[in-house]
Image (cartoon, rainbow, N blue to C red):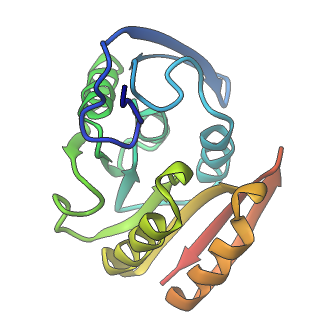
Amino acid sequence: MSGQYFENQPVIDDKKYTVNFTMNQRSFTLQASRGVFSKKELDTGTNILLKILLQETLSGSLLDLGCGYGPLGCVMASFHPTLAITLADINHRAVADALHNARQLGLNLQGVVSDGFKELPRMFDWIAFNPPIRAGKTSIYDLYRQTKEHLHPHGGLYLVIRKDKGALSHVTYLETLFSKVTLMTREKGYHVYKATV
């Protein structure tokens, strides 16, 4: 039975989970559904990416691409209320969870069900991405190309990827698209990169 988190509508029964975590000494309690990525806990990659993003001085608009149940977008909006944040995922359940969590936190975020950028015609200042490695390199590289096309000239992509899942080859490809790719941190086998237009 199919039920991958990067599918439009996972063909599995729904069940709700509660995800508790702390970020910068602030506690968060979010809802996640069965069929959504990392439904029982904040995944390590997103945790590491968030710690980097919270250290950055970001303004304008931020796209949480592949938002899952919305931990990254919700945390960023909680600490940076002036950021215009869009939550996007191919998975209907993920976007529903993300918008539910935003409302529970009193956040006014936009949510879009979109396969890549198909329903996201606008441009963004920043894009944060924890790519679905299981979707395959061809699909992910196509998303990298689309990411470049949807960033303002001063904008950038923040990306987290495991070293043992091909981080270095992904960086080599990103360097063909972006003017600069910077390693922001290495932690627990994960690399976080910032790619600027």
Say if 39 sits above or below 161 in the image: above
Q: Nearer the viewer, residue 133 or 104?
A: 133
Provide residue 61's location: percent of width, then percent of height: 33, 59
Residue at left 56%, top 53%?
A: 133
- Rendering quarter of residue 100: top left
Examine the rendered structure and indicate whether residue 92 appears above or below residue 80: above
The answer, for residue 130, to whether it is visible in the render is no
Q: Position of residue 147 (x, y in %)?
A: 38, 71
Q: Is residue 112 left or right of residue 25?
A: left
How many circles with numbers are drawn on the protein? 0
Location of residue 46 by image quarter: top right
Measuring from the top left, give residue 123's x and y in whole percent.
26, 71
Tell me, yes or no, if residue 99 can be seen here. yes
Name the residue located 29 percent from the left edge and 38 percent from the top edge.
Answer: 91
Residue at 40% across / 68% down in the picture?
A: 143
- Residue 59 is left or right of residue 165, and the answer is left
**Is 174 or 105 nearer to us in this picture?**
174
Specify the quadrant of the image occupied by residue 38. Answer: top right
Question: In the displayed structure, would residue 16 be above or below residue 58?
Answer: above
Residue 139, image x, y percentages:
42, 65
Q: Is residue 178 left or right of residue 118?
A: right
- Residue ID at (40%, 18%): 34
